[in-house]
Amino acid sequence: MGHSHHHHSHNDVKGRNLLISIVLNILITISQVIGGLISGSLSLLSDALHNFSDVLSLIISYIADRFSKKKASPSKTFGYKRAEIIAAFVNASTLLIVAVYLVYEAILRFFNPQEIESKLVIWLALVGILANGFSVLLLRKNAKENMNMRSAYLHLFTDMSASVAVLIGGLLMKYFGWFWVDSVLTVLIAIYLLFMGYALLKSSFNVLMLFTPEDVNLESISDAITEFSEIKNVHHMHVWQLNEKEIHLEAHIEFYEDISLSQFDEISDRIEELLYHDFEINHVNLQPEFQKDDPKDIIIQD
């Protein structure tokens, strides 16, 4: 049975940046709660609530990052490589829950607008923009290649966007007395959260459910492998992601002739190189067959 590993080289996620972001978000949350209560601003309080959910999500991301570095063991043969995917799923879920709650609160406030101390709102919004903007820059690089860090990055980016919206609202309330803007901006922030949260929830769910990666086509893989003159067909195929760095494939390979084990090793090496370079599959497990009486479909129900 052929079996191989290929690993992409990648930078380790920096837990230090997550810790800095956690501390900054705790400070922002405390200041926004106090400021929201004093000023009466719902958008500021909703931003504080979102920031608090971010503190929790960043802590989850930090713990997942630490666990993902633990080595495999006999009782945990894959180690904790899925920890970051679970963290991304949990964080995406909290984004959606917070967004729905914000819409509910904004609708209530829209029909009962209250005067707001706009000057305090403006200053606290500026603080939020600066602190979250710094955190966003810290996590930006890792967010491109890591779902867990992308979930943390999204929380922080939406925080920064929310602070910008709160700032605009504060200025409009200060100079035009448009207190209803507070509710409208809260709804816009929530809609953005729903959109971003759903996309992340879907991608992390797909990985956890062992679905075939969206950019992988099983028929194309089968066609590529059967280009080898020795191979009759490929069947009983499974392709899934362990995490964002590892795509696994297992399949039964039927040969035209009753080849030797050394020949199979040589052919499987060529298949593994093909799968790695053309399909970015870096963990391959092949089962050789010759005139075996079993179903020959690409997908077979186990």
Image (cartoon, rainbow, N blue to C red):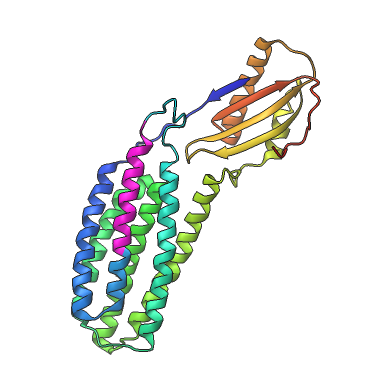
| The magenta stretch spans residue 284 | no
Relative vertical location of residue 240 with respect to residue 252 in this rendering, above or below: below
Is-magenta flag for residue 63?
yes
Q: Nearer the viewer, residue 298 or 142?
A: 298
Quarter placement of the N terminus: top right
Task: Give left or right: position of 31 versus 256.
Answer: left
In the image, residue 56 sits, relative to residue 4, either above or below, namely: below
Q: Position of residue 263 (x, y in %)?
A: 68, 12
Q: Residue at x 53, y 45 (%)?
A: 207
Query: Quadrant location of the C terminus?
Result: top right
Q: Say whether residue 160 is visible.
A: no
Q: Main secondary structure of the magenta part?
A: helix
Q: Which residues are magenta?
A: 51-70
Q: Position of residue 289 (x, y in %)?
A: 74, 21
Q: Residue furthest front?
A: 75
Res 116 seen here: yes
Q: Quadrant of residue 145?
A: top left
Q: Residue at x 21, y 77 (%)?
A: 37
Is the residue 153 above or below the residue 275 in the image? below
Number of numbered labels in the structure image:
0
The quarter of the displayed image where residue 256 is located: top right
Residue lying at 45% horizontally and 52% vertically, measured from the top left? 89
Measuring from the top left, give residue 42's x and y in whole percent: 30, 78
**Residue at x-position 24% and y-position 81%:** 40
Q: Is residue 23 left or right of residue 214?
A: left
